[in-house]
Image: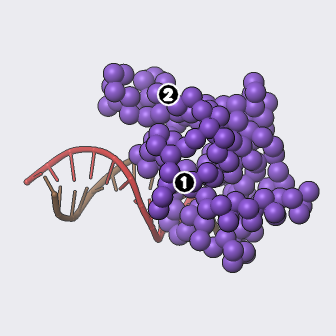
Chain colours: A purple, B red, C brown
DNA sequence: GCCAACGTTGGC
DNA sequence: GCCAACGTTGGC
């Protein structure tokens, strides 16, 4: 896959940590997307994400997992400070400050939507190739095909 | 709360 | 550098 061409992403977050409401109420509706501790997800942030890329804001580990909002990549790739904080749940004792292992960047929430549950997404044949819907998928950041993005935007527009 | 699927770790 | 054991994710 040519990940460099990806302009759309899906980013999972537990609503307990960074719900879409929390993001929207932050200054500039922008939050640092920290706590990523998976190399594939980190590499997407480091190598492929560009400012302005579209983001489907996913809530996971909750009663109704699915898409809860729309956001955009707002930039500022930098070391994730929580990896050096021993009291953080994201502390990584093996990461060295001179060579940080984990990164964070800013994500700006644009709008909250009427949630689209994973169960509903599965009903559309057009979306069955979406990575987030594949069996065993655990990656918290996945690229989204433009066709899938457009289909979902149409769903959102149709429901007003 | 269960558990399948997956990533990481570490002994060899 | 293999691979079994372990820990985590996250939908169900």
Q: Secondary structure at mark 2?
A: strand
Q: Residue at 47% across / 33% down in the picture?
A: A103
Question: Does residue A112 appear left or right of residue A2 in this picture?
Answer: right
Question: Does residue A12 appear left or right of residue A23 in this picture?
Answer: left
Chain letter of disc 1? A
- Residue indicated by mark 1: A5
- Residue indicated by mark 2: A78
Chain letter of disc 2? A
Comparing labels 2 and 1, the label whose residue is closer to the camera: 1
- For this rendering, which residue is in front, A152 or A4? A4
Return the x and y of residue A27 as percentages of the image width and height: 75, 24
Residue A65 lies in quadrant: bottom right
Q: Tell me which label, 2 or 1, sits earlier in the chain.
A: 1
Q: Residue at 64% across / 45% down in the picture?
A: A53
- For this rendering, which residue is in front, A82 or A30? A30
- For this rendering, which residue is in front, A137 or A88? A137
Q: Secondary structure at mark 1?
A: helix
Q: Residue at 46% across / 27% down in the picture?
A: A79
- Seen from this angle, which residue lies furthest right? A160
Question: Height in image: A92 above or below A39?
Answer: above
Mark 1 Cα within 10 Å, few/some/many (few <14, many 20+)?
Answer: few
- For this rendering, which residue is in front, A98 or A12? A98
Return the x and y of residue C5 as percentages of the image width and height: 27, 57
Question: Height in image: A104 above or below A125?
Answer: above
């Amino acid at each position: 896959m040519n990940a460099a061409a990806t302009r759309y992403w899906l980013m999972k977050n537990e609503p307990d940590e960074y719900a879409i409401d929390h993001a929207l109420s932050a200054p500039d509706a922008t939050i640092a997307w920290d706590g990523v501790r998976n190399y594939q997800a980190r590499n997407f942030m480091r190598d492929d994400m560009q400012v302005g890329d579209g983001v489907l804001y996913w809530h996971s580990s909750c009663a109704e997992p699915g898409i809860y909002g729309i956001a955009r990549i707002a930039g500022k790739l930098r070391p994730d400070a929580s990896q050096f904080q021993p009291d953080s749940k994201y502390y990584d004792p093996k990461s060295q400050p001179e060579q940080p292992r984990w990164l964070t960047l800013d994500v700006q929430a644009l709008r909250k939507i009427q949630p689209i549950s994973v169960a509903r997404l599965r009903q559309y044949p057009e979306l069955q190739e979406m990575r987030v819907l594949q069996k065993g998928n655990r990656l918290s950041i996945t690229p989204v095909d433009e066709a899938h993005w457009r289909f979902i935007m149409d769903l959102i527009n149709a429901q007003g």
